[in-house]
Each structure stands twice: as C-alpha cells, then as structure tokens.
C-alpha cells in the first residue's frame, strides 16, 4: 500500500502539471488522490481540508502578507529610485557600471522588500531603458536584472526563509536571517565579477563619475530606506520583537517614508492594496495546499523512504549534499519556490540532520538552490517577469544567462561545503 501511495502522489502530480493545472491546485489534488487510495472519500476530503486550514494556523505566517505589502509600498513609493541613485553614485562610473548598479540596487531593494518579484519589476523597469539607451544589449540587461533580483531572497528579511522555518518545525527565523547575509552578498559579488568580464569583452561605456558630494547626497537620500534593515533585523536579533511584529513595523515605516517622499496618493495606495492582496492570496493558497501534501507524504512514510534511499547510496556528507543539490536544482526548474520549500523540507531535513548538517545551514542551501530555479524555464516566475519588462524572448536571454547561472552554482557549492559562510553570523550573535 505504501508504494501505491507514493506512485499515486508522484504520478497524479506530474500528470496535473503536464495538463497545465496551476501548481497550487496540482499539489492539492495530488494530495487528495493519494489519500483516497487508503481511506474513504468523505474522511479523505475532510482530512485534506483540515490539513490545509491548520497549515495556515501560524502566527509566523502573518509576516508574509505584511512583508509583501511593505515591498509593494517600496516599489511605488520612490524608495527604489533612491537606492538606484545611491548605487549609481558608488559604481556607475566603472566600465559597464550600470550592470553593477542593477546588481547592487537589486541586492539593496530585494533585501529591504524581501521579494524577488518586486526587485525585478522595480529595478528592471527603472534601469532597463537607461541601459539600452547607453548601448547595453537588451537581453544582457534583462539577464542581469533577473538573476540579481533573487539575491534579496537570501539577504533578510526574506519571506521564503520564514516559510522554511515553518516547514522545518521551528528553526529560528532570527538565525536564518543572520545566516543569509554573507551568502547573499557573496552571490551579488560573484554576479558583479561576471558583469566586469562581460563589460571588458563588450567594451561597455563608463558612466559619468560622481563627485564625492553627490555620493554623500545620494547616500543621505537612501539612508532612511537602508535604516529599515537595521530596525527590522536589529529588532528581531535583539529580541525586541518577533519577525511577524517586525513585518508590521516594516509596513508602517515604508508607508510613512513614502508619504514623506510625497510619492504616494490614494490611487497608488489602492493599486498597492489590490496587488498585495492578490500576491498574498496566491502564496497563501500555495502554502495551504503544500501543507496538505507534506502531511500526506508523512502519512505515506515518504521522508523515511527518501532518507533510507539516500543513506544507502552513501553516508558521506559531501556526496549526500551533492545529490540533494542536484535534486533541488531539478525541483526548482519545475516547481515554484514556496511549495518546493514546504514539500521538500520535511523530506530532506531528516537526511541532512542525520549526517550532522545544521538546519540553519541547510535552509540557506535550499533557498539558494530554488533561487536559481526562479531564473530557469519552464516555470521560473522571475525569469518571465524580467523578460516581460525588458520585452525580450527566451531564446535571446538564455545566452547571457548561462555564465550567470554558472557563477550562481559555484557560489552555491561554496556555501554548501563551507558551512561557516552561513553559520558565522548566527554563531557570533548566539
């Protein structure tokens, strides 16, 4: 019966995805089909509905809609433009400097908003036309914008790290947030290295050198936005408030800041509210359906089966982590980030903890893997949003994406096999 449940779950899920059923519905329906194998229809429907409801009954999850709303306010409230201006003053004068501006701007904006979609929209919409005007190929600009926007999912505050904390059974959100700083920064620096090589090959122009006064002025303008990072993360680490309370403070802070900048009006607030509700609804449905699938997999003993299978291959941590990385990279190609974290964390976490891997370290590994998936067809949501903003086709953007993919995988391997890149800051503040 156990094997029948596993086959039913995998087969039904793949068939539904191939038929074009949205991921959330595919997850929920596959869970229902699997539970119907072993129990009657009425208890099956009741159990799935109950698991979906109880899966959302978490105070920590309340942080997600607040951070989504904060990101939308930042996107519309003039905060992105000030961060871009500061980044341009710092690095815009180097050859190919606008690519550096894109990467640094995405790191700063993504870190503050916690959303790759907000970063790819805000940074791409602002810098894309400017890069094209200065002689950058449109597909290269799009590629840089797409990959750099994912750095904000590793650098805190990050919604997906909150989701991982829930899926892992309560790994400290503060520790996860601290663990994301160095890997996210390392990823950004690696992307800038590729941009530097590309600029030399293509002989991209230098920007106008900013005066010291201009650097100071743009820094002062961007400082209130940057200060939010210290308020939110500092408050969580110091134990002043929880991640959920911090998300509410982030909304209030960004709203006041945008009103001070005089960038918001009633019509923009209405658009922000509708967009935030839409995004939150999608994420919430994904979480609910994914939690039901996680329960079904536990009911069918799938995590134990996967653990046994992997450990039968090898008990060497290097080999196990390599296999899990390969599997997660494949998962990221076909599945969105939130359901992937909720479904595969209960499967892989017992495996890595059994070989002595810190759950905080593994959380960063998992998120970095799935960040690469966001930029990869056929499902990569950030990829298609970035392509839409830049108005380029997939076959054109893939060529400049490949070297960026390679360097992201190199950084992923460094973070995987050098745990202190992730764990140094959490241990420092422990």
Image (cartoon, grey):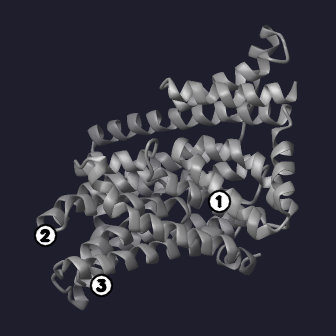
Image quarter in which the N terminus is found = top right
Q: Within the image, what quadrant is residue 265 found in?
A: top left
Depicted 366 relative to depicted 182: above or below? above
Residue 2 appears in the figure? yes
Image quarter in which the C terminus is found = bottom right
Left or right of 2? Residue 111 is left
Q: Position of residue 399 (x, y in %)?
A: 32, 60
Depicted 30 relative to depicted 106: above or below? above
Looking at the rendered structure, which numbered label has been put on residue 325? 1
**Tag 2 near tag 3, CB within 8 Å:** no
Q: Position of residue 267 (x, y in %)?
A: 27, 38
To which residue does mark 3 refer? 216
The local crowd at label 1, few if under 14, some if 14 to 19, many if 20 or more residues have their Cα within 10 Å, is: many
Earlier residue among tags 2 and 3: 2
Earlier residue among tags 2 and 1: 2
Q: Position of residue 74 (x, y in %)?
A: 38, 55
Hey, which residue is sitting farthest bottom in the picture? Answer: 212
To which residue does mark 2 refer? 134
Q: Nearest to the eye among marks 2 and 1: give it.
A: 1
Give the Cα separation between the discs numbered 2 and 1.
39 Å
Q: Within the image, what quadrant is residue 37 found in?
A: top right
**SS assignment at label 2:** loop
Residue at 59% from the left image edge and 44% from the top image edge: 338
Give the Cα separation between the discs numbered 3 and 1.
42 Å
Residue at 61% from the left image edge and 71% from the top image edge: 413
Hey, which residue is sitting farthest front in the picture? Answer: 313
Give the Cα separation between the discs numbered 2 and 3.
25 Å
Residue at 22% from the left image edge and 59% from the top image edge: 128
**SS assignment at label 1:** helix
Depicted 331 relative to depicted 361: above or below? above
Q: Position of residue 346 (x, y in %)?
A: 77, 46
């Amino acid at each position: 019966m156990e094997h029948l449940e596993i086959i039913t779950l995998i087969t039904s899920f793949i068939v539904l995805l191939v038929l074009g059923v949205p991921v959330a519905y595919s997850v929920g329906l596959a869970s229902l089909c699997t539970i119907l194998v072993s129990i009657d229809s009425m208890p099956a429907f009741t159990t799935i509905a109950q698991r979906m409801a109880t899966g959302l009954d978490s105070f920590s999850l309340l942080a997600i809609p607040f951070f989504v709303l904060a990101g939308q306010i930042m996107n519309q409230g003039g905060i992105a433009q000030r961060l871009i201006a500061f980044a341009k003053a710092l690095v815009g004068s180097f050859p190919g400097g606008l690519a550096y501006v894109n990467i640094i701007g995405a790191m700063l904006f993504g870190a503050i908003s916690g959303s790759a979609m907000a970063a790819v929209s805000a940074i791409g919409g602002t810098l894309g036309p400017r890069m094209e005007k200065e002689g950058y190929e449109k597909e290269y600009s799009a590629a840089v914008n797409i990959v750099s926007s994912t750095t904000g999912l590793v650098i805190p505050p990050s919604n997906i790290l909150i989701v991982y904390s829930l899926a892992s059974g309560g790994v400290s959100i503060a520790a996860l947030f601290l663990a994301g700083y160095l890997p996210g920064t390392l990823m950004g620096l690696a992307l800038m290295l590729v941009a530097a090589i590309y600029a030399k090959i293509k002989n991209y122009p230098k920007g106008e050198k900013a005066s010291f006064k201009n650097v100071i002025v743009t820094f002062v303008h961007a400082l209130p936005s940057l200060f939010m990072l210290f308020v939110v993360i500092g408050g969580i680490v110091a134990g002043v408030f929880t991640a959920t309370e911090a998300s509410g403070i982030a909304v209030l802070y960004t709203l006041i800041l945008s009103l001070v900048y005089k960038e918001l009006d009633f019509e923009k607030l209405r658009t922000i509210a509708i967009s935030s509700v839409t995004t939150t609804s999608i994420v919430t449905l994904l979480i609910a359906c994914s939690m039901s699938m996680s329960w079904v997999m536990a009911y069918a003993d799938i995590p134990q089966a996967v653990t046994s299978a992997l450990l039968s291959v090898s008990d060497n941590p290097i080999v196990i982590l390599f296999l899990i990385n390969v599997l997660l990279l494949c998962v990221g190609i076909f599945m969105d980030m939130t359901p992937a974290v909720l479904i595969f964390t209960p499967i892989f976490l017992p495996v890595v903890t059994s070989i002595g891997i810190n759950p905080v370290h593994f959380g960063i590994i998992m998120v970095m893997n799935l960040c690469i998936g966001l930029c990869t067809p056929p499902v990569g949501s950030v990829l298609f949003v970035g392509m839409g903003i830049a108005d380029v086709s997939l076959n054109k953007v893939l060529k400049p994406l490949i070297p960026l993919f390679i360097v992201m995988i190199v950084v992923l391997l460094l973070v995987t096999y050098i745990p202190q890149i992730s764990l140094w800051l959490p241990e420092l503040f422990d």
